[in-house]
C-alpha cells in the first residue's frame, strides 16, 4: 500500500512541480513538504483539504482509504488519463493487499464493484492483473511470498478473470478467429488466457485452450474452428525447444497453409536470434502489440 508521502510526491511529479513550487502554492515551507513526502510528518485537516484541492483528488485517495464502495468511482468519467491510471493503480494495490491477507471475497468484489461502477474491463488486464502478477513474481524473488501464496493468488485471479467475461460486449464481434495456448509443459497459462480475453474484447472470436494440449488436438481444433490465428505464449526458457517442435509440426500440415502464428512471453523477450529461426508471422511484447500485429496479418 502506498503511503501518504508517496502519494503526495507522485501527485506533485504529475503536475511537474518541485517541492518549493508546491510549498509556495500551499503557503508552507519546502522542508514541510519534504517531511510529508518522507512520511516524517502528517498534515492537519486544513492542509489535507488544501492538498486535495491543489491535486484535484479526494482526501480518501490521499489517505489511501480507497474502497470501490465509497463512491470514489462516480467521478471516474470526469478524470484525466493520469488520474484514471491512479485509480487502477489503487485497485491493483488493494487487490494484492487483500490476496496477501487471503481475503478472496474482498478481492473479487473489489474488481466486480469497480466494473459495475463503469471502469473499463480492458484496462484491468494490464493495469491490475498483469501489474499484480508481476509484482508477485518480484516478491517471490525477494522471498516475500511463498510458492503457495503465488499459487493462491494466481488461482483467485483465474476466478476474477472468469468474472470479467460478464462485462464484455459481444455485440461488436468481427469474423476473425484466434486460438491461444501456452506451450506444452509450461505451467504459465495465465498470459495466454489474458491475451485471449484481450482479443475477445477487440471483437475477435477466441478459444483459449490452455496448456498441455496434444499436438493432434491442437491441429484438429485449428481446422474445425477455422482459426485464422494461433497465439502461443512461452514463459520458461526451457520450453523453447517444445515451441520449435510445435511450430515445425504445424507448418508441416498442409491444411494449415493459411494459419498465422504469433508468439510471445517472457522466455522470448530479448531473444531475437531464436525468433529469426522460427517459422512465425509475428512476435510481440504485450497485448496491444499482439493486437496490432494480428490486425495487420488478418484483415
Ligand atoms: C503466476 C505465476 C506462476 C503460476 C502460473 C499459474 C498459471 N496458471 O499461469 C505457477 C504458480 C504455476 C508458477 C510456477 C512456476 N514459476 Co512462475 N510465475 C508466475 C508469475 C507470478 C506471473 C505470471 C503471469 O501470469 N504474468 C502475467 C502475464 C500477463 O504476464 P506475462 O506472462 O509476462 O505476459 C506478458 C508478456 O510476456 C506478453 N506475452 C505473453 N504471452 C504472449 C503471447 C504473444 C503471442 C504475445 C504477442 C505476447 C505475449 O504479453 C503479456 C502482457 O504484457 C510470474 C512473474 C512474472 N513476472 O510474470 C512468475 C514467473 C514467470 N515464474 C517463475 C518461476 C521460476 C516459476 C517456477 C519455476 C517456480 C515457482 N515460482 O513456482 C514454477 C514453474 C515450474 C515449471 N514446471 O516450469 C519465474 C520465471 C523466471 C524465468 N524466466 O526463468 C517468474 C518470472 C517469477 C520470477 N520473478 O522469478 N508461476
Image: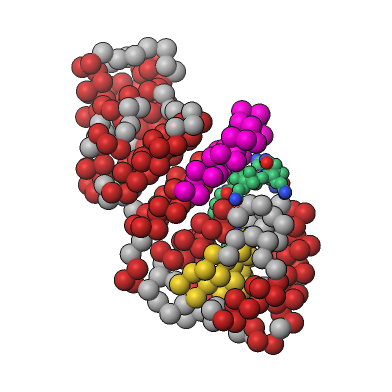
Q: Can you give x and y, in whole percent of width and height, for residue 183 in the image?
A: 68, 61
Residue 268 occupies which quadrant of the picture?
bottom right
- Depth order, front residue of 186/134: 186
| Whether residue 191 is visible | yes
Stretch in magenta = 133-159
Q: Can you give x and y, in whole percent of width and height, for residue 259 in the image?
A: 61, 80
Location of the N terminus (image quadrant): top left
Residue 73 occupies which quadrant of the picture?
top left
As drawn, 247 above or below 87: below
- Depth order, front residue of 214/237: 214
The reply, left or right, for residue 130 in relation to residue 11 is right
Residue at point 57% right, 55% down? 191
The reply, left or right, for residue 195 in relation to residue 54 is right
Residue at point 42% right, 49% down? 124
Q: Can you give x and y, in whole percent of width and height, for residue 32 in the image?
A: 35, 14
- Is residue 282 shown in magenta? no
Residue at point 28% right, 49% down? 116
- Is residue 158 shown in magenta? yes
The reply, left or right, for residue 62 in relation to residue 237 is left
| Whether residue 82 is visible | no
Q: What secondary structure prevails in the magenta region?
A: helix
- Depth order, front residue of 17/45: 45
Amino acid at each position: 500500500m502506498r503511503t501518504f508521502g508517496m502519494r503526495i510526491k507522485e501527485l506533485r511529479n504529475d503536475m511537474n512541480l518541485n517541492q518549493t513550487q508546491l510549498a509556495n502554492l500551499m503557503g508552507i515551507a519546502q522542508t514541510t513538504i519534504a517531511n510529508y513526502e518522507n512520511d516524517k510528518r502528517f498534515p492537519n485537516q486544513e492542509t489535507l483539504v488544501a492538498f486535495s484541492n491543489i491535486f484535484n483528488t479526494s482526501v480518501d485517495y490521499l489517505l489511501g482509504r480507497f474502497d470501490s464502495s465509497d463512491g470514489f468511482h462516480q467521478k471516474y468519467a470526469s478524470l484525466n488519463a493520469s488520474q484514471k491510471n491512479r485509480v487502477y493503480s489503487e485497485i491493483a494495490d488493494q487487490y494484492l493487499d487483500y490476496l496477501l491477507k487471503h481475503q478472496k471475497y474482498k478481492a473479487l468484489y473489489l474488481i466486480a464493484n469497480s466494473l459495475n461502477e463503469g471502469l473499463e474491463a480492458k484496462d484491468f488486464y494490464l493495469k491490475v492483473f498483469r501489474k499484480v502478477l508481476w509484482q508477485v513474481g518480484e516478491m517471490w524473488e525477494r522471498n516475500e511470498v511463498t510458492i503457495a501464496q503465488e499459487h493462491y493468488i494466481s488461482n483467485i485471479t483465474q476466478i476474477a478473470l472468469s468474472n470479467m467475461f460478464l462485462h464484455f460486449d459481444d455485440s461488436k464481434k468481427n469474423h476473425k478467429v484466434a486460438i491461444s495456448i501456452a506451450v506444452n509443459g509450461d505451467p504459465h497459462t495465465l498470459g495466454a488466457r489474458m491475451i485471449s480475453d484481450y482479443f475477445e474484447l477487440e471483437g475477435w472470436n477466441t478459444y483459449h485452450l490452455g496448456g498441455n494440449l496434444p499436438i493432434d488436438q491442437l491441429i484438429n481444433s485449428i481446422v474445425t474452428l477455422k482459426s485464422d490465428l494461433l497465439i502461443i505464449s512461452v514463459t520458461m526458457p526451457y520450453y523453447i525447444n517444445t515451441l520449435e517442435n510445435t511450430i515445425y509440426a504445424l507448418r508441416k500440415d498442409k491444411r494449415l497453409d493459411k494459419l498465422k502464428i504469433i508468439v510471445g512471453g517472457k522466455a522470448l523477450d530479448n531473444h531475437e536470434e531464436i525468433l529469426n529461426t522460427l517459422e512465425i508471422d509475428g512476435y510481440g511484447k504485450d497485448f496491444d502489440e499482439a493486437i496490432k500485429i494480428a490486425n495487420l496479418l488478418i484483415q
